[in-house]
Image (spheres, rainbow, N blue to C red):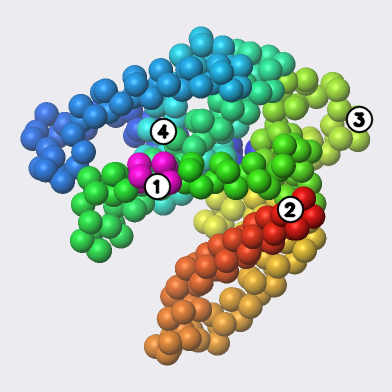
Amino acid sequence: MMTTSSLYAFFAKPEFILAAFKRKKEAHKKDVLAHIELPLWLSLVGIPAVGLLLLVLGKMWFNIEWWVTVIAIPLVFVFTLIAVTSTGLTAITPGGALGKLTQLTFAILKPGDMGTNIMTAGINGEVALNASNLLMDIKPGYMLGGKPRHQAIGHCLGIIAGAVVSVPVFYLLLQNDISKIASEDLPMPGAQIWIAVAKVLSAGLSVLPQSTRVAVVVGGLLGIGIEFMNRRTRGKFPVSAMGLGLSFVLNFSNCWSMALGSLVFWALGRKFEGKTSLASKVFVENQETACAGVIAGGSIMGIILIIIEQIVLG
């Protein structure tokens, strides 16, 4: 359901795909933002250097063949162009759809290889999403006095800091037991979706039970139908294919938390609509920020509790 809905939403707007490859008429003019942006030569040097590093690490850690990486790097560039164009025009990044397209591409190029399928799609998705996130940070950065050059440098520093912190924490959580991935303690709904798609693409629908194949077809058709109605009603259709699909993947406690949170913020929005009080500014004008804080706080506390449990029981 989530796959077909995201792909339908992606291909239903071909103008965004075409816009990514159209040459701008003003391209020959002098770049008036050159003094506040990173120089172009950094990309000309950085992409081959990082690509070579990616080729080596992909082979060492994930046994990805060198020719697969050579094909993946241009695809990353193409899909990232599409992603940032969509983000710039609609503020929506089709990360899920692009990831599935990558999985489909490498299912054809390297059939039966789940590791290659997941990792190449992961690389593609992360580059596209990070590029789009950086694009969305430009306006808030301007408002705070930051230049695009500063934001790009900060983004790169964040990548290093994130890797230094997140990788040890990830290993500490798993304790060399990969069976914990997508378990009740670490549900990882995003990972479950990628794994499920990789399994189907690597083995084919024929390996699935008959009931599962029927469910796949029903879910796929529902995803297309819901997204079609969403486009026809200009976003007013009351059912979200992504939300409904996630409800089959997440635990009931998480679904209940999302539903309850949505109901609370809907009620607060109705109560404080049109008012200028502090409560209105927090719960209506900045509800996304408040929700993000709750999600981040809950996630951090969950990780801390798991680490404490591992240390105490370890």
Q: In the image, residue 141 lies at what x, y percent?
A: 28, 57
Q: Considering only order in the chain, which callout, 3 or 4, is on the residue closer to the N terminus?
A: 4
Of tags 2 and 3, which is closer to the observer? 2
Would residue 209 be found to the left or right of residue 53 on screen? Answer: right
- Indicate whether residue 160 is drawn in magenta: yes
Pointer 3 residue: 210
Query: Which residue appears farthest toward the top when viewing the image?
Result: 67
**Helix, strand or loop for disc 1:** helix
- The residue that appears at 63% across and 78% down in the rendered structure is 264
Identify the residue position indicated by label 1 in the image. Answer: 158
Tell me the amino acid under the disc marked 3.
Gln
Against 123, residue 95 (above or below) is below
Q: Secondary structure at mark 3?
A: helix
Q: Residues within 10 Å of mark 2 (few under 14, many from 20)?
A: some
The segment highlighted magenta reads: 155-161
Q: Disc number at residue 80?
A: 4
Q: Is residue 86 visible?
A: no
Look at the picture and state if 108 lies above or below 303.
Answer: above
Relative vertical location of residue 139 with respect to residue 194 in this rendering, above or below: below
> Mark 4, residues whose alpha carbon is within 10 Å: few (<14), some, or many (≥20)?
many
Quarter of the rendering occupied by the N terminus: top right
Mark 2 residue element:
helix
Say how many tags the image has: 4
Amino acid on which the number 4 mark rests in the picture = Thr
Which is more foreground, mark 1 or mark 4?
A: 1
